Image (cartoon, rainbow, N blue to C red):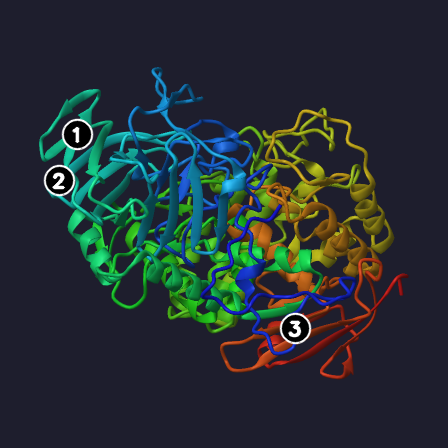
Amino acid sequence: MIRQLLFASAVLALSACSDQKHADMPEQGKVFDPLGYVDPFIGTDGKGKTYPGATVPYGMVQLSPDNGRTGWDWISGYFYPDNIIAGFSHTHLSGTGAGDLYDISFMPLTRPFHIEKTEGGPEDGTIVSRFNHQNEQASPGYYQVHLDNYAINVELTAGLRSGYQRYQYAKNTRDAVVRVDLGYSRNWDKTLATHIDVIDKQTIGGFRKSTGWASDQRVYFYSEFSQPFSAHTLINDKVKSGEVSASGVNLAGEFDFDLTELPTDEKVVTVRTAISSVSIENAKHNLLAEGKNKSFSQVKDQAQQAWRKQLSTVEISAEKDDMTQFYTAMYHTALAPRVFSDSNGEYKGPDGQIHKSETYPRYEFFSLWDTFRALHPWKTIVEPTRSKELMASIMDHYQVAGRLPVWNFQGNETDMMMGYHSVPVLIDAYFKGLIDASGEQILEAALQSATQKEFGLESYQKLGYVPFEERSWNVSLTLEYAFDDWAIAQLAKSLGKVELYQEFQARGQNYRTLFDPQTDFMRAKGKNGEFRTDFNPDAYHPEDYCEANAWQYSFFVPQDVNGLIDIMGGAEPFEAQLDAMFEAQQTVGEFPEWISGYIGQYVHGNEPSHHVPYLYQYVGKGSKTQKYVRQIMDELYHTAPDGLSGNEDAGQMSAWYLFSALGFYPVNPVSGEYVLGSPEVSSATIHLENGHGFHVEAHNQSKDNIYVQSVTLNGKPLTQFSITHQDILAGGELVFEMGSQPQ
């Protein structure tokens, strides 16, 4: 069930058209509000690993509930099937599969505290409250829940660098408590040092330093309560004191509020908290920059307006559930990367030092192994200005760290996953005019990545592949390096660097070194040039393939699909191999949880397969692309909390859906081309920043009419199976005629 809050101050309520087989759109004269179609609970159950709490587009703060447990299901802090809450912390990851953050945790309470044993929690138990989903709501920029054990209603909202909490205590409450637990840690996260200053009777500040996925995390905070606390206790490893300052590894503070003088219907305590990677003082200034005296309702309204603006760049007509999928996907794509610099431009850099961004906000949380595929191409269409800012952050990282980011996070390089996928993202932006850096500067940074000796690259440069004796994931590394190298070749060519172009164009063909014509799969190869024995393409082999098997990675040649077709024997054998992938029966049951969302051996829950359904277009079998794209959208996305078939992965899962719902997808995300599929919308308009509008129309759209009969672009028949980025930017109309049978 979708649990959304439509606010009374918002626009008039939406109504669906009477015929839901066609489209859901506002009634005549009513204003369209995309917020009504966003459900932040989608992805909080099952494989998605998202969080439901309050944030704004690209916000530094993600104020969200934590269940207080450790485990894969609680990677984002919150898991929908759970029924307890241990606190509301200010930092969370959206569907990355990485268990980190949960910084600066607040919990409103009344005495006595309710304590339960939780997985990964302290031996003597965790302070929690039971809750019921019937008393829980979420919408963009807002979250609400009732804490049953304490009869407290909690509301959360957020600004760019701050979180705002409102606690409504029961009418008979005399003494209220707000507990701040800086030692709260679960999953990969480990607290190193904490500190609290009681600045005055309404204000506290401090920091939490931790390690985990990112080794050097620093979160400073500054909090203001709506009224003075009557007493406070600082707890350092169970030792309690009434001091105004304390430090320790697992520090907590309990702040007592005397509510006896408040009217029975106004037993409310609010707290507003800003964070910083630099200092308590910077956190204070972040709070002041967002307006010291703003009410909870004002901050909530601003958050909603920010989301309306963000989501209104694309306006669609579709069935109601599809509209919920679409706008929730748009919501997810704007959760990362996120602002990391303070209001004065300062931030903690990857060298551990404090730097200042003078021109653009500094962003972090680039999940590039995931997002180079579709998320960044999506942003180049709907948010070119933002894309330019993001590219500046990637280049800033290079200037400070001396290398491009692989997976940067909280001012750290994590080297999570593989490849040097900053390279195609930067080069794509360069070709689209969305980066301040020159081609020469980008080439310099790209070559640093491509010529380093780590991560199997020394052998790759010598042999044309990464040998299995040297590294796990060797097949995946080789294939993804080859794509990145091809991108470098295109940049070199545009700059007139002929020798570099030839060198990296050749490296872009390195996928051929691992292709086994006897099996038609990409296989691990040793230093001696021989394939690894005992090959089973159906089995999970993490020693050779990254979060995948041979089926999923053997089609990862987006830079040279025609070349892949050739080495597989031509169009018919290639089609047959694709058919076999989608029709295969699973024979191996022991796969990790993060490999999910199967259609045969196609795995949608992880990224390496995302382009594969579109490959049928290259052999003239577009109807099969249409069939499988629609099947994926219908079966592997839905509107329940478990509606994502795999980790959201910082927006990539959602970006795939957005492109596919509109009817096209960037198979090669550096080519500036989008391969046609089967649109799920009845109509859509992308409101471009340049003032143009690109309109998609799908005539005779329905769940049965999934096959494209014909396509026109600006009234002219489209003879190829793709459109270009320039086609979109120029504005115009892409019209699909749909039918129930393949054309």
Identify the amino acid type marked 3: Glu
Residue identified by numbered label 2: 198
Identify the amino acid type marked 2: Val
CB within 8 Å, label 2 to label 1:
yes
Alpha-carbon span between mark 2 and mark 3: 54 Å
Residue 322: x and y, percent? 68, 58
Q: Earlier in the sequence, mark 2 or mark 1?
A: 2
Q: Give the quarter of the figure containing the C terminus.
A: bottom right
Dot 3 surroundings within 10 Å: few (below 14), some, or many (20 or more)? Answer: few
Comparing 615 with 171, the one in front is 171
The secondary structure type at the circle numbered 1 is strand
CB within 8 Å, label 2 to label 3:
no
Residue identified by numbered label 1: 234
Q: How many marks?
A: 3
Comparing 253 with 366, the one in front is 253
The secondary structure type at the circle numbered 2 is strand
